[in-house]
């Protein structure tokens, strides 16, 4: 089940972002872009008007937070934060539903995401999800930050890829 969190509902939004922030802080190497932020900075960054925050609920509890970010004309970047050892099934179902909604309701031209490569190791769980969503690697991995042992690889599914897969 999906639940949208609106920055207009300040307490509920802050509570959901706090849960995601704690998950990210416990797994800093997976979320280096969050590890250096304070909680207030993280909440503020997630409240940007071009971002939508969607909670993935399993048995009534949030098991992941998905951020959908309008990054360009018809291009949406999707990111997920979850706890260690999270079950991939609910997250994958949510991401497929979100992907479908972006193409069918929001007229997306492309949906993208980034996956980390840590000291040469790709996260096999994330790669299975990316593959199941029909995304493919775009370009070469790039350094995430100077001095960090992390590269990031961009993945994308275009409207054409999506339509081809649906037929």
Image: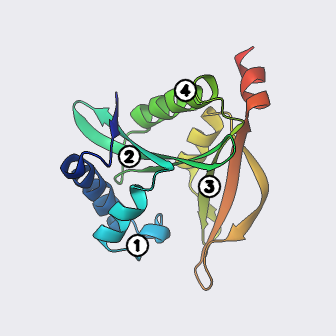
Q: Earlier in the sequence, mark 3 or mark 2?
A: 2
Q: Earlier in the sequence, mark 1 or mark 2?
A: 1
The residue at which mark 2 appears reads as 65
Q: Are marks 1 and 2 in contact (CB under 8 Å)?
A: no
Instruction: Between residue 127 and residue 101, name the one nearer to us.
Output: 101
Residue at 74 percent of width and 22 percent of height: 163
- In the picture as drawn, the residue positioned furthest to the top comes out as 167
Local crowd size for mark 4, using a 10 Å CA cut-off: few (<14), some (14–19), many (≥20): few
Q: Could you say where residue 69 lies in the image, as x and y percent from the top left? A: 54, 49
Q: Which mark is residue 35?
A: 1
Q: Nearer the viewer, residue 128 or 77?
A: 77
Q: Is residue 122 above or below residue 91?
A: below
Question: Distance between the Cα atoms at labels 3 and 2?
Answer: 16 Å
Residue at image location 54% in from the left, 29% down from the top: 96
- SS for tag 3? strand
Which element carries disc 4, helix, strand or loop? helix
**Earlier sequence position, callout 4 versus callout 1:** 1
Q: CA distance from mark 1 to mark 3?
A: 17 Å
Disc 2 crowd rating (10 Å Cα; few below 14, some 14-19, many 20+) is many
Mark 2 element type: strand
Disc 4 to disc 3: CB gap under 8 Å: no
- Of badges 4 and 3, the one in the foreground is 4
- Residue 97 is situated, as x and y percent measured from the top left of the image, at 50, 27
Q: CA distance from mark 4 to mark 1?
A: 30 Å
* Quarter of the figure that contains the C terminus: top right
Residue at mark 3:
114
Identify residue for label 4.
101
Disc 4 and disc 2: Cα gap in Å? 17 Å
């Amino acid at each position: 089940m999906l639940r949208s969190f609106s920055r207009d509902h300040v307490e509920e939004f802050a509570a959901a972002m706090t849960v995601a922030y704690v998950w990210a802080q416990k797994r800093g190497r997976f979320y280096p872009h969050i590890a250096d932020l304070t909680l207030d900075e993280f909440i503020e960054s997630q409240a940007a008007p071009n971002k939508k925050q969607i909670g993935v609920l399993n048995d009534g509890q949030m098991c992941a937070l998905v951020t959908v970010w309008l990054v360009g004309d018809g291009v949406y970047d999707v990111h997920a934060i979850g706890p260690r050892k999270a079950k991939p099934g609910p997250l994958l179902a949510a991401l497929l539903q979100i992907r479908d909604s972006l193409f069918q309701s929001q007229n997306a031209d492309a949906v993208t995401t980034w996956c980390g490569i840590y000291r040469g190791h790709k996260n096999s769980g994330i790669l299975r999800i990316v593959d199941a969503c029909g995304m493919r690697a775009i370009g070469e991995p790039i350094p995430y930050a100077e001095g960090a042992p992390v590269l990031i690889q961009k993945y994308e599914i275009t409207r054409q890829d999506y339509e081809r897969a649906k037929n």
